[in-house]
Image (spheres, grey):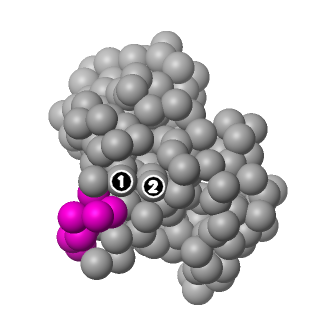
Amino acid sequence: MTAVNDSRIRPPVPSQLDAAQRKVYDEIVAGPRGEVVGPLGVWLRRPELADRAQRLGEYARYGTSLPPVLSELAILVVARTWGSEFEWLVHKPIALEAGVSPDAVEAIRSRRTPLLEDPAQSAVYAFCAALLGDHHVDDPVYADAVRVLGETGMIDLVGILGYYSLISMTINAFRVPPPEGVEPELG
């Protein structure tokens, strides 16, 4: 495991942003996130990527057809799959607040299949685990997820998985440290 201060790319200093970086920075701060943290800071080094990715992220986090409990469950599965501490530590409390049970969160953290009584959560978890783990989804798992989410929800779910995989790859490749004052949990 790398040291917390072993980041490969540090975010640009806000007072030293060029015009393109400043535009994206200001849009992120003015949006629902309210701040530029984690991988968003890395992306600011390439404002064109930062602009497009943060807009996709705003949709994936705040605009999909999935209720927060299902989207946050999916985000935790992505974070655990990639071993992305930053994303895990940011989204764990959001997932708990949205209604993912503490037992389910711990099971995902421990790489165990959670016992999910809610059929929608169970279907979403099975779909996410299959796609992220096996890189494909068998027909029964797919059909169960479609029954719960519909086709539109399935498109949103795959979009969430893709976006948060990009986030997690950025975190891992550039060693984005976890939020300050929070102990890593994924080990």
Q: Is residue 111 above or below residue 126?
A: below
Percent coordinates x, y for residue 154 in the rendering: 29, 42
Q: Is residue 102 above or below residue 63?
A: below
Q: Nearer the viewer, residue 49 or 136?
A: 136
Look at the image and give the residue range highlighted in magenta: 135-142
Q: Nearer the viewer, residue 65 or 150?
A: 150
**Which part of the image, by quadrant, shows the C terminus?**
bottom right
Residue 45 lies left or right of residue 37; in this view the side is: left
Q: Which mark is residue 144?
A: 1
Q: Nearer the viewer, residue 180 or 5?
A: 180
Residue 47 lies left or right of residue 113; in this view the side is: left
Quick one: SS at disc 1? Answer: helix
Residue 69 lies left or right of residue 66; in this view the side is: right
Q: Earlier in the sequence, mark 1 or mark 2?
A: 2
Percent coordinates x, y for residue 20 in the rendering: 25, 24
Percent coordinates x, y for residue 137 in the rendering: 25, 67
Q: Identify the residue at image location x=59%, y=40%.
A: 69
Say which residue label 2 marks: 123
Q: Is residue 133 above or below residue 13?
A: below
The residues bearing labels 1 and 2 have C-alpha atoms spaced at a distance of 6 Å
- The residue at the far top in this view is 30
Q: Amino acid at mark 1?
A: Asp
* Circles 1 and 2: CB atoms closer than 8 Å: yes
Percent coordinates x, y for residue 120 in the rendering: 51, 46
Badge 2, how many Cα within 10 Å: few under 14, some, many 20+? Answer: many
Q: Amino acid at mark 2?
A: Ala
Kindly tell me whether residue 54 is visible in this rendering: no
Q: Is residue 120 above or below residue 50?
A: below
